[in-house]
Each structure stands twice: as C-alpha cells, then as structure tokens.
Amino acid sequence: MASQESQMQVMDGANGASSDEPASKRVKLDTPMQDSQDAPEIQKTDRVKGVAPIKQEYLILAPGQTGAAEENAAMDDDAAEGRTAPNPSDKRDARDARDGGGRDGRRKKQKGGQNKEREFGTFSDAIRLCNSVAWTPEFSPRPCKQGERCNGLHDLRKYLKEGRRADLETFGGKCPVWETHGRCSSGWRCLFVSSHMQEIEREDGRKELVLTVDSTKVASGDDVEGDEAKPGVVNMVAPQVKVDLSRKKVDLNKSEAYLAWLGQDTERYRTHHHKQKGDEDVAKDYRAQYIEPPFKPSEKRRLYFGPETPTLAPLTTQGNLPFRRLCVELGAQVTYSEMALGMPLLQGAKADWTLMRAHQSEVTPPRYTPTSIIRDYDNAKDLKFGVQIAANIPWVAIKSTEALTRFLPHLRLVDLNCGCPIDMVFKTGAGSALLDSPSKLERMIRGMNAVSDDVPITAKIRMGVRDDKPTAQKLIERLAFGSPEMRDTAGAPGCAAITLHGRSRQQRYTRAADWSYIAECAALIKSYEKKSDELADTIREADANTLPNGGKMYFLGNGDVYSHVDYLDHVEKAKVDSVMIGRGAIIKPWVFEEIEKGQYLDKSASERLTYIEKFARYGLEAWGSDELGVNFTRRFLLEFLSFFTRYVPIGLLEYLPPSINERPPAYRGRNDLETLLASKNYKDWIKISDMFLGPAPAEFKFQPKHKSNSYEIEAEG
C-alpha cells in the first residue's frame, strides 16, 4: 500500500488550524469528553473489523479501557434508516410515517433501534398574518377573500411588533434569499425582513412600510408570491393542477386507452394461451390475434451512464432539494427525487408533488466523454434530474407516470422503485415486493413506457426478497427482453437502465453489499447484448422501437461506496456502467469531488462547517425564511447531521481505505470544531443549527431516528 501521504490531499485546518477556533467557540459541547492527559496509552493494533482505526493520540478511553477494539459502537443502519410500518395513531411527519419502526415490526426493548414516535413540535408566528397583506406595501393590501370572517391579522405594524419573534441575527442579519435573488418569497413573514424593507414618506405625509426588490438580481417571471415563488427552482406544479387531480378532473387519456387495451389483451392471452399450456399452435393463435397497443413507445431520449457520471441515489428524507443541490455543487452528475408514492401523486397530494421539485443546477447536462460506441446521444438535451416513484399495481404506475411527464417539464427519466424494503411499502405489494411479481413488474414498465412520451423509464431493484433466493438475474433478463411470450409479440419492455442494490430485502443493511453478485449480473447483461445480436434476423428479434438507447440497457451498481477507490474499483472489476451512491454521500458529500479528482480529500472542520452553512442557506431558499421555513430547514439539517457527523477525518486514521461500515470509538478531533462535528449527541447538532438558524423556538423538538444518539443522562451545562 502506498504511503498515507501519497493517497490523500491534506486541506487547510488538518492540523488544528486556528481558522476553526472562532466557530467552535460559539457552542459548548453537550457530549461528555475525557481529558487526553487522563487517557491511558495503548499499543497500535491490527485493524479490527467494524471499528474505524483511529490513531491512538486521538482516542478517548474510559477508565480501565486499554484499546479501541473494546468499544465498537456499530450503529444498525437498518434501524437508522427505519424499516417498518407505523402505528396509525402516531402523529408525525408523513415521510417519517413511511419509514419508522423496528425490524420486521418487532419492537426493540433494548436501547438500540428506532425512536418510533418522533415529534417535531409546532412552530408558527404568535399571531397569523393574513395573506392579503403578506407581500404587499402597507397601504396597498390585496382584497381579503375571507372578509370580516378572517381571523388573520391585517395590521402590519402590529404583526411586526407582536405577531412574530424578533429578526434573526445569523448571516449578519441579512436575508440569504434576498441577498442571492434580490427578492424574498416569504415577504413580511421573513425572519430577516428588516434587511429588505424600508419606510417611505408619501406625499400626504404618511409613512408606509414597503418591501424592497433588487431589480438587478430578479429574473424575469419572478413576480409570483408565496409558495409558488421559489427562485431557482423548477418543476413547480400549479396549485390548480393538484386540485384537479384530487377531484379527478385531469384526463389521463393515454393511460386510459392503454389500460383498456391491456385489459382486452390480457383476456385474449388467457383465452388463447391457456387452452393447452405449451401447445405451440395455441401460442401461434395468440400471436395471430395480437393487436398492437394504441400507444407504442415513442423515440425516447437517449440516456448515458458512464464512469464520468457518479450518481446520487434517491434517498427518503435525506435526498431533499437542498442536499441534492449541495451534492451537484460537489460533483454529482445524476440526481433523483425522494421516492414518491404513485397514488398520492394521482390524488394531487401537495407533499408528494413537492418532492418533484428540482434546483436549476440539476437541469444542466451531466458530464460526458464522447466515444464512438455511444450513438445518437445528445448531451446538450440531457439533464441530471430524474424522479422515482413506487406503486403496487400497474394502473397506478402508468397513470402517475403520465401525470409526471405531462406536468414536469424537466425530467431525465422516471425510475420505478422495486427495492424499497420498508414494511409499509412492501406489504402493499410495492417496492421490493415487486421482485417476487415479475409479470406485474413487466406490465408496469411496458405501460409506463407507453405513456411517458420521450422520457425514458428505468428501474431500481435489490438482489431479491430473501437472502437464500436471489432473483435479480432472472428479473434483469425479463426487463431486458421481456417474458418469452410477450417478447415474440410486443418486443422488449423498454427499460433504459437498471440499478442493482447488492443486498436482499431481508438483509437490509445488516451485511456489506455483495458486489460479486452485482458483477455476475453485469456479466449477464453483456451476454444479453450478445444474445440480442444473435436473435437478429429471426422471428424472435425484438422490435427496434421497443429497445432503449439504440439497443443498450445501462446497468448501475449500488451499495457501500464511500470513496473514489470504491467507485473506480467497482467500475473496473464489477464492469458496471456507473455507480449509485447513497449513505456514503450523506456522510461525505464530497465523495463526488474525490471521484472527479481521483484522490482522498481530508476536509478540515471549517470546510465541513461551510457545507452545513450552505445546506442552511439552500434550505431557506427552498422552504422559506419565515418561521415555518426556518424550522423546516432546521429539522432537515439535523437529519443530515445525523449522518454527516459519522464522518471520520482520514487524517485521524491509521489505515486506508476508510469503510462506511466501520464505526469509530470515542475520539477527539484535531481542534474543538472537529470534535464538535464528531458528536453523537443530537443536542450538539441542535447547537450547530443554532449557528445559522438562530435559537430553536421552545416548541421545536427533534430526536434522531436511531436511539444510540439519544442520551438518557444529559451532560452538565
């Protein structure tokens, strides 16, 4: 192994640079620490499985402890991610309702596991300001729709004095949204409003409060207000569309026509093919009776996945817009929305349609190195952002796909989730339950392709439902060619890319991802392409109109990637086209930068604090700078920190490469800020959020998903 110095780039602050000190002094640790002078010396030992090899000078040892191996604080990522159905009586955030609970529905009696009944409190202004005056000059309010029945406040000066808390002093007291975009969509509710308001004396001597706008920064079309005024955000669906969906007034005509055909064809298939199973004459009779569907897949846009396109996985809760924006800035080339459920999309649910929003940085083309192998791919027309949905029956998948492609103008692809292990999803027949329903899955992919216009359809799968019964290989062949009976008549399903997570549904996160199995599947896909060539000029040749990417189906691997070494090793040895990164990106968002530069980056504590600050700024832009938006940003920043604080600086490690599945023993950083950023105590995370979002209101509550971060005994002040 090469020397550690040759494998990493040491950034500023690696040796406790003084630049970190001012920020670290703003907060006081809640995490109990032990003075290094009291720590006993230990001998360097061999690498212990599951334990991060911290250099001895940084270890914090309890009295009587002689080595790091005695404290393996391995966190159960299965529990940290949340995997079972919720209690219907739980009053929590809807996204937590999807992923709360202990494994297989069993409550854990020990301290480990899930905080199943998480609440985040309520946070709002003391007095609600009526929307009629929320964005207008003091003397020019809009007509109030509620009239005399309105229980909102219309007196602007009273609201600023009594109806809200005082302006925040973070970011120098200046509104980050206004500073960037020249206007603030939160209007008078903004907790930095004093930085973009003024009092003007009118001709009649009256003094009027008005909001200011920097015309040099405001883009054309940025004249809308409230929730529809999110600068730099695309795929904003009009409220009326969601209302029409909820009232079933949206005519999804392509889906209706295709589903009518599908029902007739299914009945025709049963009539002809099951008279005598295996009778070739009966099979020929069905082919003779086969009628083309009313909507054959149009010429889809070509996709490209390659070593240049490290991909950010779709992540529930953590994969929000501010986090994706940060990852794109650090080098992520493909991003996905958080998983949305098909039925709520069709019902016009605001929460699920909000997940479809993307930042303008996500609609730029991914990195691409032209080669002669790739045909008809236009990088200029490609973009980074795709969406992922889950559905349990074909008509839901098909109709929601048509709705997405009709109302979202900026889509790279629509990905069908066939791997989610969450009990709430699995027990309905969606997510990883589709792994045991290949016929249903094939019907979904075919139907989604038929109604998605030029937007490609992809799928994300796991190895199988059970550890002892991997099914991915057969499923991949079916997605590539279709079942034999359908292939002969309707061609291939048209799946443009498959991502394989190297774990089963049963395994969850309890063992390392199986990249040897991913490599086997990649080799099979290569053989499928050869097989496809052998089928040419025969009656079994798939219709060219049903083959994606000119006949190429891309294959991505997923699981436990934590560095450029992991990434490049899997691309080279497993022969995947690209790699999708999930937890590794939450812990270390600059993993994409490492991949691009091909080296380890020892980010200083001050640099990592900058990423936290950026998340806070991006959160205020996405969710608003009012009371609700600030604390929504705080909540998701804390969710991010629950993973981000797991990062162990490589300058503190005895050995490389680092592993995502290793947990560090108690250690101190190279300076106070680095120690703070390693805290497992969520109270310290709240203090970090206070640095950028001001003190949390008394009503705000936060608990991490995993109980190992919830201390029963509070440290002294």
Image (cartoon, rainbow, N blue to C red):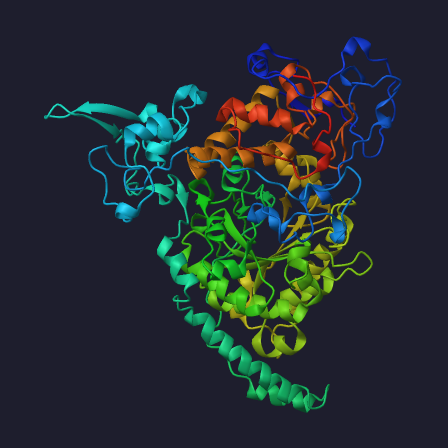
Q: Relative to 132, say whether 616 is above or below.
A: above
Indicate the quadrant containing the N terminus: top left, top right, bottom left or bottom right. top right
Q: Residue at x 51, y 26 (%)?
A: 613
The count of marks equals 0
The residue located at (56%, 88%) in the rendering is 289
- Residue visible at 76% across and 26% down? 2
Q: Nearer the viewer, residue 477 or 44?
A: 44
- Image coordinates of residue 571 in percent, x first then y, are 68, 45
**Quadrant in which the C terminus is drawn:** top right
Q: Position of residue 320 (x, y in %)?
A: 53, 42
Residue 220 location, quadrant? top left
In the image: residue 260, left or right of residue 157: right
Pick the front one: 448 or 283: 448
Residue 340 coordinates in the image, percent (x, y): 54, 54
Q: Quadrant of residue 204?
A: top left
Residue 395 occupies which quadrant of the picture? bottom right
User: Eyeballing the image, is 580 above or below 467?
Assistant: above
The furthest residue to the front: 148
| For residue 327, side relative to residue 533 (left or right) | left
Q: Position of residue 691 (x, y in %)?
A: 52, 22
Task: Report whether residue 476 is seen.
Answer: no
Residue sitting farthest toward the top? 37
> Can the viewer see residue 90 in this picture?
yes
Viewer-closest of 56 and 377: 56
